[in-house]
Image (cartoon, grey):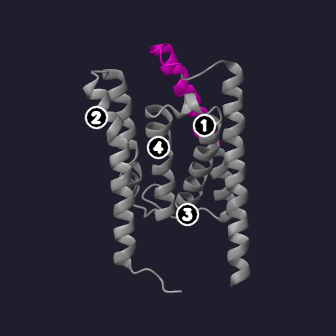
Amino acid sequence: MKQPTSVAKSVKLLTVEMLTFSLLSVPVFFSILKSKIVEFVGYAIFLLGGFSPHLYEKIVRQKLDVKVKFGLSSTVVLHSFFGQFLDFYEYFPGWDKLLHFYGSFVITIFFFETLRQSSKFWNAKNIPDALFMAFLLGAFAGLVWEIAEYVTDKIFPYIGAQRGLDDTMMDFVFNVLGCYSAAQAIKYSLRQRDVRR
């Protein structure tokens, strides 16, 4: 099978980035039209978040794998455009849990990939250390997300990001399941790579 050229990969990446930008821009535009300032600020933050992998690369001086960048950006699109703007959170009861699982899965892979490379701020970690730290950091990211939901609900009670203790605890469960699944997927991928050698 013919491998794609670097130009073909660049075109594909640019197409994905333009689609990401377009999808994340729609809610920003409509919140301005509706004069909903709080929504506008939230959607604008997510628009910037969709491109945070590029900012990360510049600050830390690491090159992220295209699949990792796509995973991070897709998480933001699934939450902001589909979840909030198109109300998937309301129409599909499992959407929230799916995104907690997927987001934790992606962020754990991100942490593993970044910890395996040296950067401006740290030296590369060995595989067991990187895997363990990625799992912990992924779980911590889920915790920070829940705290952000709690604080958001305290500042803007009409948003209703959290729906009680049971909802929060199930979010934690799906966050940890996502982290654990990512760790297992990484281990499996590494074993497969070793078998092919």
Query: Which residue lies at the image location 38% right of the left edge and 50% below the top edge?
Result: 20
N-terminal label among 3 and 4? 4
N-terminal label among 4 and 2? 2
CA distance for labels 2 and 3: 41 Å
Closer to viewer: mark 2 or mark 3:
2
179 over 94 or under it: above or below? below
Residue 29: image tag: 2
The residue that mark 4 highlights is 76
> Which amino acid, mark 1?
Trp
CA distance for labels 3 and 4: 27 Å
Rendered location of residue 90, percent (x, y)? 56, 28
Q: Are marks 2 and 3 in contact (CB under 8 Å)?
A: no
> Which amino acid, mark 2?
Phe
Identify the magenta region.
Answer: 139-160
Rendered location of residue 70, percent (x, y)? 47, 57
CA distance for labels 1 and 4: 13 Å
> Which amino acid, mark 3?
Ala
Q: What element carries label 3?
A: loop
Q: What element carries label 2?
A: helix
Q: Does the magenta stretch include residue 144?
A: yes
Q: Is mark 1 on a helix, strand or loop?
A: helix
Closer to viewer: mark 1 or mark 3:
1
Q: Quadrant of residue 125?
A: bottom right
Closer to viewer: mark 4 or mark 2:
2
N-terminal label among 2 and 3? 2
Rendered location of residue 64, percent (x, y)? 46, 62
The residue that mark 3 highlights is 124
The residue that mark 1 highlights is 95
> Which amino acid, mark 4?
Val
